[in-house]
Every structure is written in C-alpha cells, then in structure tokens.
Amino acid sequence: MCEEQRCEEEVFVLAASYVDRYLSVVPTPKSSLQLLGTACLLVASKLREAVPFTVDKLVAYTDHSVTTEQLMVLVTLLLYKS
C-alpha cells in the first residue's frame, strides 16, 4: 500500500516500529494483526505525510475486513499506550 500510494519510506518503517512496540506490551491474537498494522499505518502517515492516509482508504485496502469503528478504537488505544 505504501508503495502504491507513493508515501515516504519512513511511514512504513515507523508503522512497523509501532507494531513491534505494541506487540511487546499487549498480547494480541493473530486475528487482530491486520487491524493493528492498519492502525499503525494511519498513525505513522499522520505524523510523516503532508497528506496522510484516510481512514476510508485504509479500510478499503483491508477489503473491508477492518471497520472504521475498530480502527478508530485501536488508534485511540495506540495513542494512549504511547
């Protein structure tokens, strides 16, 4: 997705770092990894991109297996945990 959207390489690296840090603190089932990665991409893009990813675009990239509500709840948790 980052490559297709031509975002800065730093966005993906930062998102991967967020995933790693979250997983080291919070036990997370495999079924929630796509949601976690999507939330981390959203936060990283908002910090590093002039035009960040939109929630709707990220949900579409997950083929709607993640809902907007799930994404926003996890983003809130990510920001609270950091």
Image (spheres, grey):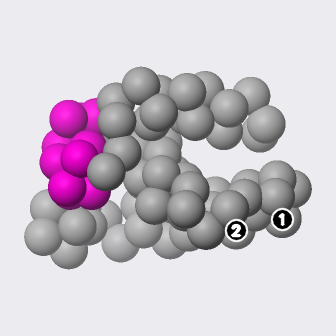
Q: In this view, does 31 lie to the left or right of 24?
A: left
Mark-to-mark CA distance, 2 and 1: 6 Å
Is 16 covered by the magenta stretch?
Answer: no
Q: Residue 58 location in percent, x, y?
A: 26, 47
Residue found 34% across the figure and 30% down from its top = 68
Q: Between residues 14 and 57, which one lies in front from this camera angle?
A: 57
Q: As displayed, is residue 53 above or below residue 9?
A: above
Residue 59 in view (yes/no): yes
Quadrant in the picture for the C terminus: top right
- Please, what is the three-letter code of the amino acid marked with disc 1? Ser
The crowding category of the residue bearing disc 1, from other C-alpha atoms within 10 Å (few below 14, some 14 to 19, many at least 20), is few
Q: Between residues 65 and 45, which one lies in front from this camera angle?
A: 65
The crowding category of the residue bearing disc 2, from other C-alpha atoms within 10 Å (few below 14, some 14 to 19, many at least 20), is few
CB atoms of marks 2 and 1 within 8 Å = yes
Residue 48 in view (yes/no): no
Magenta part of the chain: 53-64
User: Which residue, given by chain and number where applicable, does mark 2 sit on?
Assistant: 20
